[in-house]
Amino acid sequence: MAIALRKPQEIEKLRAANKIVGGALELLRQNTKVGVSLKELDTMAEDYVLSQGAKPSFKGLYGFPNAVCCSLNQVIIHGIPTDYKLQEGDVIGYDIGTEKDGWFGDGAITVPVGKIDKQDEELIACAKDTLYEAISAIKVGMRFKELSDVLEKSIRSKGFVPLYNFCGHGIGKKPHEEPEIPNYLEGKNPKAGPKIKNGMVFCLEPMICQKDSKPQILENKWDVVSADGLRGSHYEHTVAVINGKAEILSQA
């Protein structure tokens, strides 16, 4: 497994692509209102990305038809935007990628629509808090499997479970690079596998299910739900390891 080590000037290129991700996600958050359609939100974010001199990198990637993954309620990841108009009490996840000057950005948030119930509030908080806990735990010399273990323990401690078979990943000149970073420990030994080093850039993205980790893909071949049929949540940041710790690149 060859995990790229980025030079400082390369990290700055990645930071530029990811800052646009952060801006697009903030725009989507601010415009998450009752009555707005998923396609309208998708177009809004795409227009913003283009206005910043970047391209929406998900559009056409593996055949995905849109700029933003809009994952509504039971859909945890990879939701295709539709004409559906947001309603009070919905939960909506946005995942967006960018490409600027040949470098990629990636990030995701899950947002409430109006007032949501306590379980949904906790569901969203689990993804967000787990992400930030994992980022704060990153240090040089730690193994990626240890990071997966941190992610899983954080998710389970909050009363939820990680989605299986999908993971965080490296990022750089391609949208998905080595390593794969599951939100759960594969195998029994967290002290195995490659170590985190300065210059590595990767995406962490906790994907949260309520009871069943097993994924199911819906008829459109994209929307991923849990076998439990319950709502999910998803948060993601791109981070760079600089001076021994992780720095978030995908902030607005």
Image (cartoon, rainbow, N blue to C red):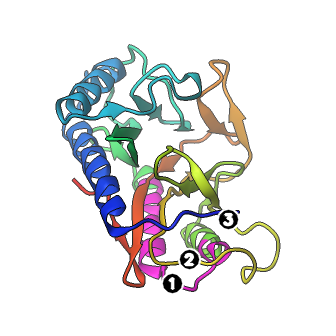
Q: CA distance from mark 3 to mark 2?
A: 17 Å
Tell me the number on the disc at residue 5. Answer: none
Give whichever of discs 1 and 2 has the lower sequence position.
1
> Per the image, is 152 magenta?
no
- Residues at circles 3 and 2 in contact by the CB criterion of under 8 Å: no
Classify 167 as above or below 144: above
**What amino acid type is highlighted by mark number 2?**
Ile
Question: How far, Cα to Cα, is label 3 from label 1?
Answer: 20 Å
If you read the primary sequence from the N terminus, does the residue marked by circle 3 or circle 1 appear first? 1
Give the number of the disc on residue 184: 3
Point out which mark residue 196 bears.
2
Residue 198 located left or right of residue 99: right
Name which residue lies at 75% across and 79% down.
192
- Residue where numbered disc 1 is placed: 140
| Residue count near mark 1 (Cα–Cα under 10 Å), binned few <14, some 14–19, many ≥20 | some
Marks 1 and 3: in contact by CB < 8 Å? no
Q: Position of residue 195 (x, y in %)?
A: 62, 78
Using the image, determine if residue 33 lies above or below residue 6.
above
Label 3 CA crowd tier, 10 Å (few <14, some 14–19, many 20+): many
* SS for callout 1: loop
First in residue order: circle 3 vs circle 2: 3
Amino acid type of the residue that numbered disc 1 sits on in the rendered structure:
Val
Seen in the image, is 216 located left or right of residue 153?
A: right
Q: Main secondary structure of the magenta part?
A: helix
Q: Which residues are magenta?
A: 123-147
Residue 63, quarter of the rendered image:
top right
Q: Quadrant of residue 32?
A: top left
Q: Secondary structure at mark 3?
A: loop
Residue contact at pointers 1 and 2, CB within 8 angstroms: yes
In this picture, is 160 found above or below 80? below
What type is the residue that disc 3 sits on? Tyr
Name the secondary structure under disc 2: loop
